[in-house]
Amino acid sequence: MHGYLWFVAKRALQMLAVIFCGISATFLVTHLSPINPVEQVLGRLSARANLSPEAIASTRAALNDLFGTGAPLHEQYVNFWLRLIRGDLGPSLMAFPTPAMDIVSRAMPWTLGLLVSATLITFAIGNLLGALAGYNQNNRFFKMFGIIAMGIQPIPYYVVAFILLIIFGFLWPVLPISGGFAMDVTPGYNWPFISSVLQHAILPAFSVVLVGFGGWFIGMRALVSNVINDDYVTYAELAGVKKSTIVGSYVIRNAVVPQLTALALTLGGVFSGTVITEQVFNYPGLGSLLIDAVNAGDYSLVLAVSTVSITAVAVAIFIVDLLHPLLDPRVKTE
């Protein structure tokens, strides 16, 4: 137990180091950009009303103080971390003066609910069927399934997404193809809103599952094909152990460990894949929000989205990493 706690502590320090380096890199990239958020706001204010030079000067001074852009870069960096600890990354330029973190907190449930759920479902189904295909290598159904998986897996995601849009949006228009929910429903904990959200999530989620399924299936089938030749599996079969027990406790448990590492990497790519998914289906998540923030030069919002994404990915990888010693005693924690 002491060894495992030390293992957790080391992984936690690594996670904090990854978060610190990732957020610091994002800060430098945004603050070295030629786009000045103060001038962006002043430009929008000047377009709406005729401001006197004195008003522009006083507004510029107030905005420099608000965004912290008047100080040297190292002071901005220290102030950024002090504000980040308080959960304050300043106001958004696109929705001034709404705090950037408030906008991110409204968009984050859409991304987490759609892409993380779809990824985990894909991981579970793909590995389960891949394990059964690897154990039952002569089964015709799993052979056919493997051919289909290998045919779909190399297709780029956006191609599959557009094919689904054409089929279910135009040729057989039975599913919504854009947005997160219908415009005529009131958001809240009510069945019309929940059912509308689920309907709008079917196509994006199905596209993620359809593309990602083949990789998990093929990988798990190959791993199981090697595991079933090990001595402990042969001994269990000769000893009359139930087939379900062999598959679940002997085969899948040992073969799934490398797949967990791949899951951690896949979860790391969720927030990069969300940009494509949400743009194709016009889904109101962090991906669409990030694209809008970059186009508007809103680096407060870019920093907020990036900070949440980096932290979420690091925590997900940390959790998956902690499962390795629990699933495979051969993984040393000391």
Image (cartoon, grey):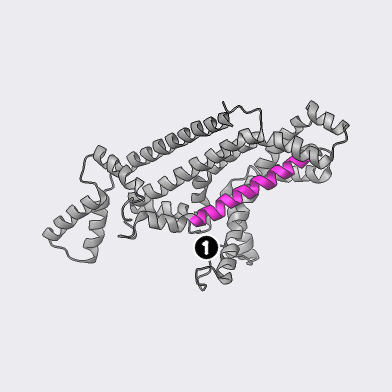
Residue 229 appears in the picture as rendered = no
Horizontal arrangement in the rendering, residue 323 relative to residue 306 (left or right) = right
**Label 1: which residue?**
180
Percent position of residue 176, x then y: 58, 65
Residue at the spot 11% in from the left edge and 59% down from the top edge: 54
Query: Which quarter of the figure has residue 93?
Result: bottom left
Horizontal arrangement in the rendering, residue 241 relative to residue 252 (left or right) = right
In front here: 208 or 255? 255
Residue at the spot 66% in from the left edge and 27% down from the top edge: 330
Q: Residue furthest bottom?
A: 184
- Quarter placement of the C terminus: top right
On screen, residue 255 above or below 284: above
Horizontal arrangement in the rendering, residue 152 relative to residue 244 (left or right) = left
Residue 248 appears in the picture as rendered = yes
In front here: 73 or 292? 73
Q: Residue furthest left?
A: 54
Percent position of residue 12, x then y: 48, 35
Residue at the spot 47% in from the left edge and 52% down from the top edge: 287
Q: What residue type is disc 1 on?
A: Gly
- Quarter placement of the N terminus: top right
In front here: 177 or 319? 319
Residue 313 falls within the magenta-colored stretch: no
Percent position of residue 154, x then y: 63, 42
Residues in magenta, as a range: 109-133
Percent position of residue 129, x then y: 74, 44
